[in-house]
Image (cartoon, rainbow, N blue to C red):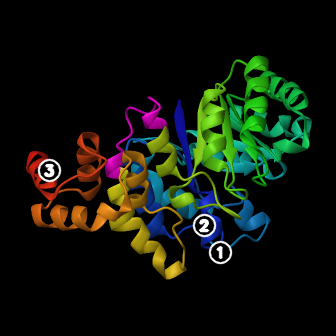
Amino acid sequence: MNLFDNTLRDGGNVVGHGFSAELTISIVRGLLAAGIQDIELGNCKGMGAYEKLQATKALSDQEYLKILKPYVSQGRLGMFLMAKLADETLTRTAKDGGLTFLRVGANAGDGAGSVQAVELVKKAGLICRYSLMKAYVSTPEELAREAKMLQNAGVDMITIMDSAGTMFPQEAVSYVKALKAAVTIPVGFHGHSNLGLSQANALAAVAAGADEIDCGLLGMARSAGNCATELAAATLKKEGYLQDVDLYGLLDYLDQELIPAMKPYGYHVAVTPTDLMLGLAGCHSNFLPMFRKVAEAENVSLHRLIADVSAVDRKNPSEELLREIARKLK
């Protein structure tokens, strides 16, 4: 099971069409340091959109590729590519820039018109991901047949996109199971939060056999946002997945770097890293002032302190217990 982070692509909608060079570098570093290696980035509308769709509230593709050059060997970095914009110049530029993949995107039911784009990506020697956008306009059976056709055309990984955030968990399960029965390539799920169900849908999709979950740091994405990367990491680690992901490192990065950096954009964080840890550990927020006091006094991670103390006593932890565990954390 894998996390596929879309912050630097879908999350670009929060700031225009894409993030600045400084934020792009910060986010790539933060993700890689936390053990999240599959990263989609660039213009929120994909490669070529800067020139062809006038999506210019971002850096150009070439500028993104230049600043990402030091990081392409450290993870699996790639960009989105609308099937209708695909051409050999774009796919060759992606390859020359050191990207690992391009993710071709088209609405569900339009797969036959995307075959040429898939072939161009494969010809360039790149991994071809594919997004079945607005997946809910097709039945699970129809989407499965389309996925099979796309696999035969050369697609390496395929993603069910709940682009309007309209699915319920049982629907996510139906789509995932249908595709898993039809194809042998990995199947991913991309959910939006319009009904507040992106996290529940992600867990349901994984339980149904999904190989990958799309996510965005702080939930950043178009409209109501995506499943938050940190929430997906926390809950799926609790389910026994993602052992290589450094959750505490990720939460510290969000607290110390990304959340402050997003304040000038007026971005509201729905679930802060500390609130997430309270929920994950089963720690009541009434205890938070005491935890903050001890973590600051002992100079230890607040998040680790909450987790370790709660593993011992979730009902009524004492300050003495907090200090004892804080000393061990040192």
Please say if 111 is above or below 267: above
User: Residue 170 lies in what quarter of the image?
Assistant: top right
| Amino acid type of the residue that numbered disc 3 sits on in the rendered structure | Leu
- Local SS, label 1: loop
Nearest the eye: 221 or 238: 238
- Local SS, label 2: loop
Point out the stretch of residues depicted in magenta. Answer: 236-249
Residue positioned 67% across, 50% down in the render: 197
- Local SS, label 3: helix
Residue 321 tag number: 3
Residue 57 tag number: 1
The Cα atoms of the two marked residues, 2 and 3, are separated by: 46 Å
Residue 89's x, y, as percent? 71, 49
Which is more N-terminal, label 3 or label 2?
2
Which is more N-terminal, label 1 or label 2?
2
The answer to whether the residue labelled 2 contacts the one labelled 1, judged by CB atoms less than 8 Å apart, is yes
The Cα atoms of the two marked residues, 1 and 3, are separated by: 51 Å
The mark lying in front, picked from 1 and 3, is: 3
User: Residue 190 lies in what quarter of the image?
Assistant: top right
| Residue on which the image places disc 2 | 18
Which is more N-terminal, label 3 or label 1?
1
Give the crowd class for mark 3: few <14, some 14-19, many >=20 residues within 10 Å.
Answer: few
Residue 259's x, y, as percent? 43, 69
Residue 151's x, y, as percent? 77, 24
The Cα atoms of the two marked residues, 2 and 1, are separated by: 7 Å
Is residue 72 left or right of 149 when viewed as pictured?
left
Count numbered badges in the picture. 3
Nearest the eye: 19 or 70: 19
| Amino acid type of the residue that numbered disc 1 sits on in the rendered structure | Lys
Q: Is residue 53 magenta?
A: no
Please say if 171 is above or below 196: above
